[in-house]
Image (tube, rainbow, N blue to C red):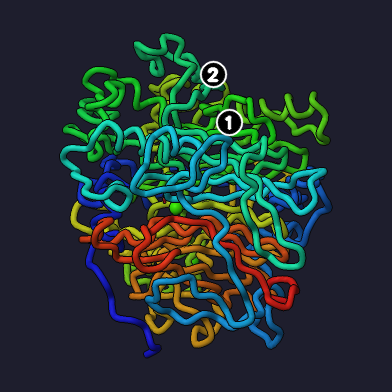
Amino acid sequence: MRNLLPLIGSHPGGRSALTCRFRCGDACFQETPNNSDNEYAGDIIAGAVSRRSMMRAAAVVTVATAAGAAALTGPSAPQAEAAALAGHGHGHKPWPPHKPGRSGARGLRFSPVAPNRDDKVTIPAGYAQNVVIRWGEPILRGAPAFDPEKQTAKAQAGQFGYNNDFLSLLPLRGERGRQVMVANHEYTDEILMFRGYDPANPTREQVEIAWAAHGLSVVVVQEEYRTGRLSPVNRHPLNRRLTATSEFRMTGPAAGSALLRTSADPTGRKVLGTLNNCAGGTTPWGTTLHGEENFNQYFANGSTDMHKRYGVRTSASGRKWERFDERFDLSKEPNEVNRFGWVVELDPYDPDSTPRKRTALGRFKHEAAEPRLTSDGRPVVYMGDDEKFDYLYKFVSSKRMKKGNSRAAREHNLTLLDEGTLYVAKLTGDSPVTEIDGTGKLPADGEFDGSGVWIPLATGTTSHVPGMTAEEVYVYTRLAGDKVGATKMDRPEDVEPSPRTGRVYVALTNNSDRGKEGKPGADEANPRNGNKHGQVLELAENWDDPAGDGFAWRLFLVAGDPDDPSTYYAGFPKENVSPISCPDNVAFDAHGNLWISTDGNKLGSHDGLFGVATQGDRRGELKQFLTVPTGAETCGPVIQDRRVLVAVQHPGEVDGASVENPASVWPDGPGKIVRPSVVAVWRKDGRDIGV
Ligand code: FEO
Ligand code: CA
Ligand code: CA
């Protein structure tokens, strides 16, 4: 047995009760919202699965990493995966053969960090780190220095927000050594922000500070010569804060719908605020996407079936915002909640632009939105709905991206996500269902794998779902997924296409309810009952025909203690891997390695960041790059050649903790308030990460 640490906490989702209350509105303690009788493991649409599309060669496009955004290069040459897919048909696996060998994966040549519970960011030997920016640091002109005892909403609106999650680094032309950092601020931990906080009686000032601490930040960062150290450029003209009260515009086919109108906005097109922005994406046309995730928790007094399907409470909300703004009280403003749960697109290069909520991408608990281009230049956006037994989606635009940075190209590209088709995934295993016994035991063919079909839900103003209008499909997307028999997944989190191979990776973080009485049991894509540690699914598309219905899939990782026979590390010898649990945010490096951050490690260690090769003889060799402080989740990650950037979210979020009784003293040590912060890591010798 390897030296794993004893377990801490017993919350079913792998997190402290404090996390449940502030992050998800106690979602784990409430009935899972998907009680549809939608067949989950059956085969109603399997006949529609076409492997024909996968038998054609696929041209693959290089995408939207930060570097891709830099060059805005668009389609590149066909890649190896195309050849692999070309020979794929019935009875044949589409994947190239894999044999473990001796060479180390380029980009992952570092000494792995051991599991630990240290209240710090632990990094490999030979690497260095700095805190790039902390909650409360001023970024806008006129914002004061952070003082935890003198917080005001006005100050917070000019300072870096709370609980940084998604991060993007975009190039900044003409300013040497500088990049534009965009960060999500998912939610607030009032009990760790305010001395003497009384959850039953928040003050107006505390609520307004929380509104200002949510949302997004745009901050220009400056790199230090010859190191990876980054620091914020205070008062840069591109710096920006968007909060729970900033103006956003609804666009796309459901904009203006009666379902989106409120007394404050009879147009159904103008929304105040973005909430619970979790992960996101960076587009090849130089914008960022931000998923509104657990938006339900901010609303009180839900009453309809749709409120229920989206997990809105029928009573007061946890933060009691409805006491200070009636729009959060659904008994008074029932449609306000429909204006959240979208993907937001932000143009960080235009500080005067109004960010858009893109209705064509559907409404659910959006974890992330990661785009890629088809071989003819149209964006495809992959999206997970992070809820037990909810679904995996994609959107395929009907428009091609225009290359270049001209004003006309930029204006055109800002319309790409308003027209296209929204799909939901149905996955079918290729092994007999009797071989999927819920323990994680591999079936006789040696893999959890199979085929899938993308079921179209709506194209523009045309609905493909019987009994639902297109507007209803976009606003009540979960219901559309229920009706067409989408596969109930183990909490789909971040989804990332590989810029090298075109394969798409889906983090499925866990699902403690899988197989419980009255709940769906294991299927080949979600093969463990009471799934504590999660899995990573790998999906192969035909990039020549992304609107085609079929794809192939297999599980890349089945997470957990490598000594546990239910785990699987892509076939790599498990004695040589780091243990991983609860995969969440994912990113690729330039070498084609997948980097996975975790949230809610159930093996007793703090959460961390891991790198794993997806191709070649080291495929499946997973190595831990860092761990985060007590109570924190690892977010962000951005992997550049010389730098790894992570967002350390909710440090100190441990049951019983408060400002007066902190569980973590990161990043500034004893006597200082714990602060969610962004961290950069680089190699001391100045060379690239992991080579
Ligand atoms: Fe905000 Fe699904 O994690
Ligand atoms: Ca199989
Ligand atoms: Ca997440």
Residue 421 shows which numbered tag? Answer: 1
Label 2 residue near ligand 1, CB within 8 Å: no
Residue 438, placed above or below residue 419: below
The residue that appears at 64% across and 78% down in the rendered structure is 618
Q: Residues within 10 Å of mark 2 (few under 14, many from 20)?
A: some
Q: Is residue 670 visible?
A: yes
Q: Decide if residue 70 is on the left or right side of residue 315.
A: right
Instruction: Report which quarter residue 275 is drawn in.
Output: top left
**Element carrying mark 2:** loop
Kind of residue indicated by mark 1:
Thr
Whether tag 2 and tag 1 are in contact, CB under 8 A, the answer is no
Which residue is labeled 2 in the image? 461
Instruction: Report which quarter residue 512 is drawn in.
Output: bottom left
Q: Decide if residue 344 is on the left or right side of residue 311.
A: right
Image x and y of residue 631, in percent = 35, 64
Q: Decide if residue 216 is on the left or right side of residue 548.
A: left
| In the image, farthest residue toward the bottom | 1
Q: Is residue 434 visible?
A: no
Residue 258, placed above or below residue 71: above
Image x and y of residue 482, in percent = 36, 37
The residue that appears at 66% across and 41% down in the rendered structure is 283
Judging depth in this view, the residue of 110 and 215 nearest the camera is 215
